[in-house]
Image: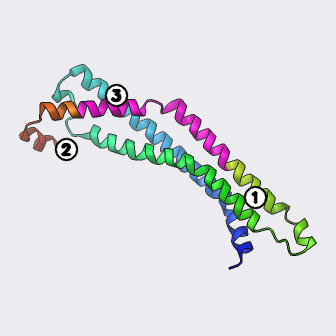
């Protein structure tokens, strides 16, 4: 296996890959925020009514909660992937350096550019999305705890079988 070829190939695609992951992370961030806001609005309505019938009859809030957890967990995981992708770009670019002759060594500056740019891009994306998470999504866990309390109360109070079948509510 020619590690130089592998290193050159990976180092040239890693920056576009990091940027593609950044776009995906932005999508996940916006989706998490939208779902969080929806769940929060529904919880406020239910808490004001303080009755089972005030709770989302079709179980949409429970489904939205599950989707929020999935999207938010994926977003948080992606934040930690950015520096790893940057390091992968660094290592692959350094693997691509040809040290066989003095001419090859002098042309190694492109490999160093890919190495440093991928590290930089990975770290910057991780920082930006970590700050976005801290600034805008700090209360997702609070909302999740409130929702779980509501679900627990519903379980304790019980929902008759007719209502379960009628509304499609799954607990």
Q: What element carries label 2?
A: loop
Where residue 121 appears, x then y in whole percent? 69, 49
User: Residue 170's mark?
Assistant: 2
What residue does disc 3 label? 41
In the image, 11: left or right of 131? right
Where residue 17 appears, x then y in whole percent? 62, 58
Where residue 50 appears, x then y in whole percent? 20, 22
Distance between the alpha carbons at the discs numbered 1 and 3: 46 Å
Tell me, yes or no, whether the two marked residues, 3 and 2, touch with CB atoms within 8 Å: no
Which of the marked residues, 1 or 2, is nearer the chain's N terminus?
Answer: 1
Q: Quadrant of residue 129?
A: top right
Q: Which colour scheme is used?
A: rainbow
Q: Is residue 14 magenta?
A: no
Q: Which residues lie in the magenta part?
A: 122-151
Can you say which quadrant of the picture contains the N terminus? bottom right
Which of the marked residues, 3 or 2, is nearer the chain's N terminus?
Answer: 3
What residue does disc 1 label? 114
Can you say which quadrant of the picture contains the C terminus? top left
Distance between the alpha carbons at the discs numbered 3 and 2: 20 Å
Residue 86 in sight: yes
Residue positioned 33% across, 40% down in the render: 65
Name above or below for residue 49 compared with residue 135: above
Which of the marked residues, 1 or 3, is nearer the chain's N terminus?
Answer: 3
Residue positioned 69% across, 72% down in the render: 6
């Amino acid at each position: 296996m020619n590690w130089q070829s592998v290193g050159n190939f990976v180092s040239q695609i890693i920056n576009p890959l990091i940027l593609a992951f950044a776009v995906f992370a932005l999508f996940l961030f916006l989706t998490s925020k939208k779902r969080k806001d929806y769940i929060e609005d529904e919880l406020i309505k239910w808490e004001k009514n303080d009755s089972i019938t005030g709770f989302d009859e079709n179980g949409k809030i429970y489904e939205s909660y599950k989707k929020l957890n999935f999207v938010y967990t994926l977003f948080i995981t992606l934040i930690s992937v950015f520096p790893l992708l940057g390091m992968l770009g660094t290592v692959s670019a350094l693997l691509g350096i040809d040290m066989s002759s003095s001419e090859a060594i002098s042309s190694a500056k492109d490999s160093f550019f890919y190495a440093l740019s991928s590290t930089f891009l990975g770290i910057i994306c991780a920082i930006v999305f970590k700050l976005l998470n801290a600034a805008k999504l700090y209360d997702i866990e609070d909302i999740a705890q409130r929702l779980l309390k509501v679900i627990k109360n519903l379980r304790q109070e019980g929902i008759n079988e007719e209502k379960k079948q009628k509304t499609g509510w799954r607990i």
